[in-house]
Amino acid sequence: MSAILLRRQLTDIWPRLADSTRSALKSLVLTSLQTEQVKSISKKLCDTVSELASLLLPDNSWPELLPFIFHCVTSDNLNLQELSLIIFAQLAHYIGETLVPHLTTLHDVFLNCLASPRSNSDVRIASLGAAINFVQCLSSASDRDRFQDLLPLMMQTLTEALNCGQEVTAQEALELLIELAGTEPRFLRRQLVDVVGSMLQISEAESLEENTRHLAIEFVITLAEARERAPGMMRKLPQFIQRLFAVLMNMLLDVEDDPAWHNAETEDEDAGETSNYAFGQECLDRLSISLGGNTIVPVASELFPAFLAAPEWEKHHASLIALAQIAEGCSKVMIKNLEQVVSMVLKSFQDPHPRVRWAAINAIGQLSTDLGPELQVHYHSQVLPALAGAMDDFHNPRVQAHAASAVLNFSENCTPDILTPYLDVIVTKLLVLLQNGKQMVQEGALTALASVADSSQEQFQKYYDAVMPYLKTILVNANDKSNRMLRAKSMECISLVGMAVGKDKFRDDAKQVMDVLMSLQGSQMESDDPTTSYMLQAWARLCKCLGQDFLPYMNVVMPPLLQSAQLKPDVTITSADSDDDIDEDDESIETITLGDKRIGIKTSVLEEKATACNMLCCYADELKEGFFPWIEQVAPTLVPLLKFYFHEEVRKAAVSAMPELLRSAKLAVEKGQSNGCNESYIKQLSDYIIPALVEALHKEPEVEICASMLDALNECVQVSGPLLDVSQVRCIVDEIKQVITASSSRKHQRSERTKAEDFDAEEGELLKEENEQEEEVFNQVGDCLGTLLKTFKASFLPFFDELSSYVTPMLGKDKTAEERRIAICIFDDVVEHCREAALKYYDTYLPFLLEACNDESSDVRQAAVYGIGVCAEFGGSVFKPLVGEALSRLDVVIRHPNALHSDNVMAYDNAVSALGKICQFHRDSIDAAQVVPAWLSFLPIKGDLIEAKIVHDQLCSMAERSDRELLGPNNQYLPKIVAVFAEVLCAGKDLATDQTASRMINLLRQLQQTLPPSTLASTWSSLQPQQQLALQSILSS
């Protein structure tokens, strides 16, 4: 005990101790190490020595330590050998680099301890741990390679332990090797075939303990997952993948036909499943995600047919379960072979064994999620009738309930037009199941009804009157403890049905439902009652459905919601090697190891907290200014949660809520609903939220959440931008620099992975996906800068000058199309919002814009031609010399053979708009009699609705002032102008503002009155018949 206490206090008290005390302590711990007989205490003493050594060795303040340990490790005392190896292992962990000068000696020590016939299993395991820790701590590959010759001996430690029946020792060795596989997989590369071969041999040996076999499989899966450190390495061993897949499939056969599964009295879906079965499932999922479909699908395709053709139901079951497990990782490849996959599963809907039918339904549910929406679009006519048929299996309620759950998975990825034709059959069957005596069937039916309503939206109205009475009956009557989940799911279903059918249809029942929820809200509930979480979500959906009519209920809803959002995480922290373990089998506790600490977190608390935070965001978004009275309590609850690292969903919800809170405050002040608060309140709230968001962004570890934070920051600046002071803008700009730098560094690390010897196309695909997330970060940076430029205009330019060295490189040919597009958009914003002050940047950026008009990416072309338009508008004499080149570049975009294809139409429309601006602002630099009619011939534009309104307004203005070049000699282009007006007016509000449309109508009426009848007739006759009719109706109204 004193060793433990000493270790815990050492780092704090050591600097304050006298030299004599320090010397005495150092010599005492080393003497105790030699004399202590109790093994557990010896190991605690090793911890103390290592901790003290990590403090003193780097500056050579304990010169006698290393000679002492080297002496112990070469002595004949096996106990001392083991303890000194444990100390070496820990020193490698703490201060490995300090020991690099002793590498040769250490290598010989480990070699000797692993190979010596005198060593016992404890010494070998300690030596294995020390060698592995050293390999992990060395930064130089050549230093690591010096340990390569130890690998066969490391493996020998494992095989000898197994041969002697010492499985506990073997399991220790496996755990150490798994750690090595995860952190330094490339160390194993030269001997990969031997190492993985041995592991698969262990995994196939059914005489060994389950745990030993599982650890050997874990080793191989860990290697497959070590993508960042050894990309593609395991895909080079297809023969091993085949063996491993077969082992995992055989583990799925370890399932018993338990009567509890058939009687379906309990939720327990895994009745009869063993730990082998559960481990096999988990590993198939991980293996397919880490190796991908091109590697896994051929292996699976070879094994599945044999399993499905076998007489045993367990084999049919195993292939369907395996298919569901690999779908996520193999989705891209499976989508290409969808027909074979779906027909294999649907055949099994007819299997005589109910557990196989259950597995087939389970596979359809999983495939609906992983292969949607392609599966829904192409196979709805086979899948939905099959699920509807399975709901009639009254002898097997578990099959019925699972069919209902699969309808939920199918409809989540489904559009109303696909679902509507089947609604009659599905809703009727689900209503029958709702009246079933088995609770799990009722629960499945409720969840499916909720999802079907959510996916079919207003199409669900015709079933409302039949469905709602059943739902209300369950809500009111399912009161006892055994029915808690049923009641909770009825809340979910009612609220989703209400949202689907809308306020007018739901209004009469809403009051009654809310009264029941209010009485439940006031009652005492047990901590494991699911009602709380479901009720939080149901209230928020009811708010979405009822809008401002929900405000009277906020006083009931908010107090418990705030309480849930303020829940403290239930955390247990122990030392990683502590004997008082956190119960790792408790599913409600998640454990993570950080350094030498093991942390256990109760996940149910975190989930309730996340739900509550999401709901707060929902209310602020829905109620707008109506949420104002709650901001005072909600802001201090959510702002600190921007850095809540225990749970991503909590952070995401807090991030999303920030702009909503500011928007709510701003609207309340503007509409006089802020209890006397004025703009200074918005400033105060903004001063609290924006710096907190910037600080959280600085510390955020997840790329996806970084992008969300930038998005939220952008929205906050849009709401309260003018209230920001210079120092706050400075913080935002500094953080944007940091974000760009961190992102570039991550991309660089990924590009380093492409140099690995086993890098392959599959790795390239995965890398591309990771880089796309990075591009989303850049995209948000671009949006933020656009908002800052729009808000502060020319006064932001000193900051832009600092950022230009970060932005300009993004225009390079070596950058992705998305990066180039974002950089061009930033420059477009500078020109548009800073006008004359931006002229100094034209020399640098305009060449890029002109060049980018020919870019392969249509998105880049769109940004470039838009930029030419704004430069033409604001560039004056600086742009004038470039008009000729600009015209030829725009001409290439406009006359592209597929210019009006959906991929290219936005670039086309923006090029036409830019051409119009050159006609408007640089008429004297062009051959107007040629260019203006050409521009007119490209109208109307219909893809980019924002540009369409601007361009058609410009056309209207030119026609109003009888622009000579527009009308042409003898008004020859008048029919074309009228045809454009007709098409624009017939498109409703899409292609012109109301104001432009009414000006067009006035012009047409003037033409009717002023043009000679013959001209009018020929102009009119050039229109399509339906345009003539539509125009007559518009002009006569």
Image: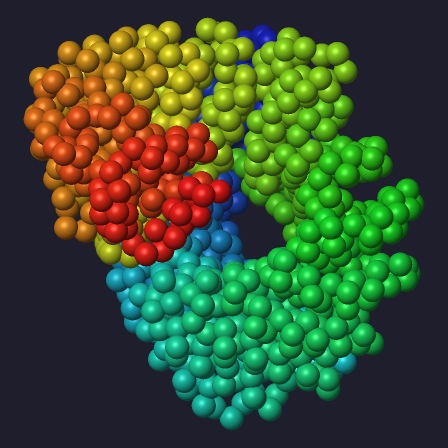
Instruction: In this rendered view, identify the residue nearer to me: 962 or 913.
Output: 962
Image quarter for residue 591? top right
> In percent of the image, x 26 and y 62: which residue is there?
236
Q: As drawn, is 458 to the left or to the right of 677?
A: left
Q: x%, y% of residue 347?
A: 50, 85
Image quarter for residue 391? bottom right
Instruction: In this rendered view, identify the residue nearer to me: 90 or 795.
Output: 795
Q: x%, y% of residue 936?
A: 21, 37
> In percent of the image, x 38 and y 21: which residue is there?
785
> In percent of the image, x 49 and y 53: which residue is there?
175
Q: x%, y% of residue 659?
A: 57, 27
Q: As drawn, is 516 to the left or to the right of 717?
A: right
Q: Measured along the vertical axis of the image, is residue 125 above or below residue 744?
A: below
Q: Measured along the vertical axis of the image, is residue 795 above or below residue 564?
A: above
**Is residue 953 in view?**
yes
Quadrant location, the N terminus: top right
Instruction: In this rendered view, identify the residue nearer to me: 139 or 88.
Output: 139
Q: As drawn, is 149 to the left or to the right of 214?
A: left
